[in-house]
Amino acid sequence: MSVSSKELAAHKRIPLGMVIIRPAKLFDLPEISRIEVKSFREKYPRGIFMVFLENNPGTFLVAEYNGRVVGYVMAYLRPDLEGHIMSIAVDPEYRGNGIGKALMLEVMERLVKKGAQYIGLEVRVSNERAIKLYEGLGFRKVKRIIGYYADGEDAYYMMVPAREWGGIS
Ligand SMILES: CC(C)(COP(=O)(O)OP(=O)(O)OC[C@H]1O[C@@H](n2cnc3c(N)ncnc32)[C@H](O)[C@@H]1OP(=O)(O)O)[C@@H](O)C(=O)NCCC(=O)NCCS
């Protein structure tokens, strides 16, 4: 059964226990694109989700609630053993329910299992909400990258060593 936007506006709080975190599948890509459009000023080039999924099937995850994709995270293991978070977004109607944190925890666990020594990411310096999420998971601001984004905004490179991060359990 699908949940309409109207229903969600009335019920913004959802039980996290009913959210399933699972690997993304090809049929999820339209929903993932829908969330990307609502979430970012700069979009990835068309087709990148499919290529990313082919190359990193275990670390491209979605959050599903009531049969609907409500968030995703894309990550991969770099040759230098950095587990890199490439993108994370939650449908605006479902934010603030712990879904972003749940996606991060699951993908970090999977990256460490694959051999990541640390987890890294870039985030807009103005993105306080995301920075809070990452700091809550142990990430620290390591450096500021001037003009990282196409519109000229700077990024923080944030990082957490695997040994400092206890994992889910
Ligand atoms: C960043 C984002 C993924 C967080 O997803 P979410 O599901 O709303 O996050 P959660 O509910 O799991 O919250 C996790 C933490 O984020 C922080 N947070 C969440 N909502 C917040 C708000 N309104 N204001 C400030 N901090 C907030 C809190 O630290 C929270 O931890 P806490 O609940 O233990 O206090 C989501 O806001 C989003 O999709 N943003 C647009 C895309 C984006 O900016 N992605 C990151 C690019 S680097």
Image: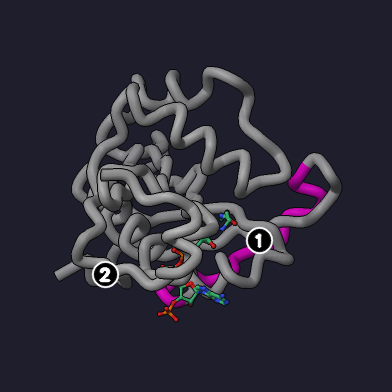
The image quarter containing residue 94 is bottom left
Q: Secondary structure at mark 2?
A: loop
Residue 143 is situated, as x and y percent measured from the top left of the image, at 66, 63
* Highlighted range, magenta: 136-149
Q: Amino acid at mark 2?
A: Pro
Front residue of 10 and 131: 10
In the rendered view, tell whether residue 169 sits above or below residue 154: below
Some atom of ligand 1 lies within 8 Å of the CB belonging to the residue at label 1:
no
Q: Secondary structure at mark 1?
A: strand
Side of 17 where 65 appears, left or right: right
Residue at horizontal 56 percent and vertical 41 percent from the top: 36
Residue position marked by numbered label 2 in the rendering: 15
Q: Residues within 10 Å of mark 1 (few under 14, many from 20)?
A: many
Quadrant of the drawing holding the N terminus: top left
Front residue of 117 and 2: 2
Residue 103 is situated, as x and y percent measured from the top left of the image, at 34, 55
Residue 100 - label: none
Residue at horizontal 69 percent and vertical 58 percent from the top: 124
In the rendered view, tell whether residue 56 sits above or below residue 81: above
The image quarter containing residue 27 is top left
Residue position marked by numbered label 1 in the rendering: 156
Q: Amino acid at mark 1?
A: Tyr
